[in-house]
Amino acid sequence: MIDQVTSALVAHMQARLPDLGTVQVHSLSAAETPFPASNVVVALIAVDAHEHLRSLPLVETGDGFERPPLHLRLSYAITFTGAHADAQTNLARVLALFHTVPILRTAELTPAVGAELGTLTVQLRNTTADERNHIWTAWGREARLALYYTVDVALVDLLADTRGWGSVSEHRVDYLGAP
């Protein structure tokens, strides 16, 4: 599902900004293929559990209890590989796109993602100079102008087929010292 969310973001940028040129998914690692020339590059930089939805209760089913789908928060860096002036222009257009349409609904998503999630929320992240330095240093590249976004919420049903995965048949909480 994570790669489908990335593809949906790229498809959305290409559909809404067709003259932006090619939008390419890249790891940004210096060990991977070189940067494509004069392209917008989207890189997934972190996958985190959504902190507000991490401890959802078990869901009761006919066979017992199951864990709810996993809610994720995906972090992306979006940069441009051409001249710095072009980078400013193209990133400003991406910034305007996600500022005006921060919630991608079913109609704006690829069919696979729209059917699973319904919506994606795209939020610009505030990053410090140290965070940006750590990110680019970890990739082994010189720092570039980039936008950093967090995408909420990707529901990933890791237990789609519960046969063989097991389910909780009893959920019990014992408090110490209670009669």
Image (cartoon, helix red, strand yellow):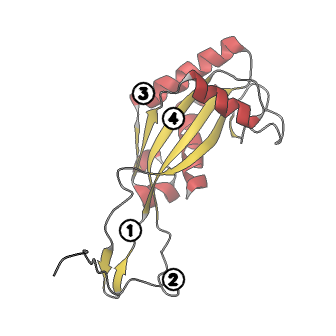
Q: Residue furthest front?
A: 177
Q: State whether residue 116 is above or below residue 144.
A: below
- Distance in Å between CA atoms under marks 3 and 4: 11 Å
Give me the C-alpha separation between circle 3 and circle 2.
41 Å
Question: Which callout, 2 or 4, points at the residue further toward the start of the chain?
Answer: 4
Disc on res. 99: 3
Q: Amino acid at mark 3?
A: His
> Relative to residue 155, is residue 166 depicted above or below?
below
Mark 1 to mark 3 CA distance (whole Å): 31 Å
Q: Are marks 3 and 2 in contact (CB under 8 Å)?
A: no
Q: Which type of secondary structure does the marked residue at label 3 adopt?
A: helix
The residue wearing badge 2 is 165
Foreground pick, 16 / 23: 23
**Which residue in the structure is indicated by mark 4?**
149
Q: Using the image, tell me which numbered label, if any, was put on residue 68.
A: 1
Q: Is residue 16 visible?
A: yes
